[in-house]
Image: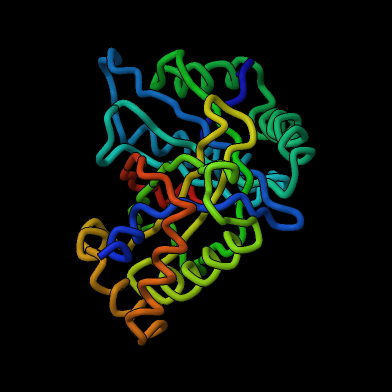
Amino acid sequence: MKTKLLLSGAILSLIFASNLPSFAQEKPWIIEATTLHWNMEKEDYSFKEWKELETEYHQKVTMKNEYIKGAEVLIHTYSPDNSELLVVRAYESMEDLEKSADRDWELILEAWPDSTERRAKGDKVSSYYSNFHSDEIYSMLNYPKLYDKWNDSTAMVFYMKKTHSVPMAKVKDGSASERSAVFKEFIENIIHKNDDILAYYPMRHLYGSDSRDQVEFFVYESLEKMVADDGSKGMELAKAHWPDEKKREAFVEKLNKYTSPWHGDWIYTNVPELHK
């Protein structure tokens, strides 16, 4: 194949409407998110064949590429565009992201050394996608919640929430240190302690179309579990952490200074066979 195969109360509302600060890790991981689109005009579309093709690529290339530390392929469940697939890859640095493309090509040549076979395989995979795609690069933020029970047979629900950052100049009586402290306290005591949220990945814009973007991924066992997470458990955890109502209200007021009223929602389901 000539081209790389592309796999590639206020406290209640804060569970799904909080805005993350721009506090990066000492060496934040780099997240590459590529939005692909199904070829809606393909007449012989077969999801089974597509998954077999991409699973083969995943095993022979993505899993063997040492620069790719994590990968997901997320398929539309509820979003404005039913043609989209979101391909997410994680790297330890921008240098590793750049090296990854060359390493992909080396592994492709190893897996399909015959140029005719390679081209035919690439054409078959490419036929499932439109020619349009878009790319965003994010920097992972502190305090993610990690999950260690992934398997290749159980699909998970990924709720993606996108918010816009609030410039410090617009925050009355605010500071970067206070912002970091209140978000750390909220995330560690509300999100991390919520057993329905299996994993949580906060990230912010690094390169892309909108410098205001901050993105959070919440991972659930199922759509039912996501819907059931209506904020009541968050309120229980909030009352446990801040039993004094006045102190709880004061914390919420402080946190609200750094939150944007705007957010957007997307719900995806991952393809477990394509997880790394």
Looking at this view, name the residue that lies furthest to the front: 173
In the rendered view, does 193 fall on the left or right side of 239? right
Q: Position of residue 66 (x, y in %)?
A: 73, 48
In the rendered view, does 65 fall on the left or right side of 127? right
**Quarter assignment of residue 226:** bottom left
- In this view, 102 is above or below 190: above
**Quarter assignment of residue 65:** top right
At x 28% / y 12%, what residue is drawn? Answer: 41
In the rendered view, does 143 fall on the left or right side of 186? right
Q: Position of residue 54 (x, y in %)?
A: 47, 36
Q: Position of residue 103 (x, y in %)?
A: 74, 35
Q: Position of residue 49 (x, y in %)?
A: 36, 33
At x 65% / y 62%, what residue is drawn? Answer: 177
At x 38% / y 76%, what residue is drawn? Answer: 248
Q: Is residue 64 visible?
A: no
How many numbered marks does the figure carry? 0
- In this view, 164 is above or below 24: above
Q: Considering depth in this image, is 192 or 10 the residue closer to the camera?
A: 10
Quarter of the figure with the N terminus: top right
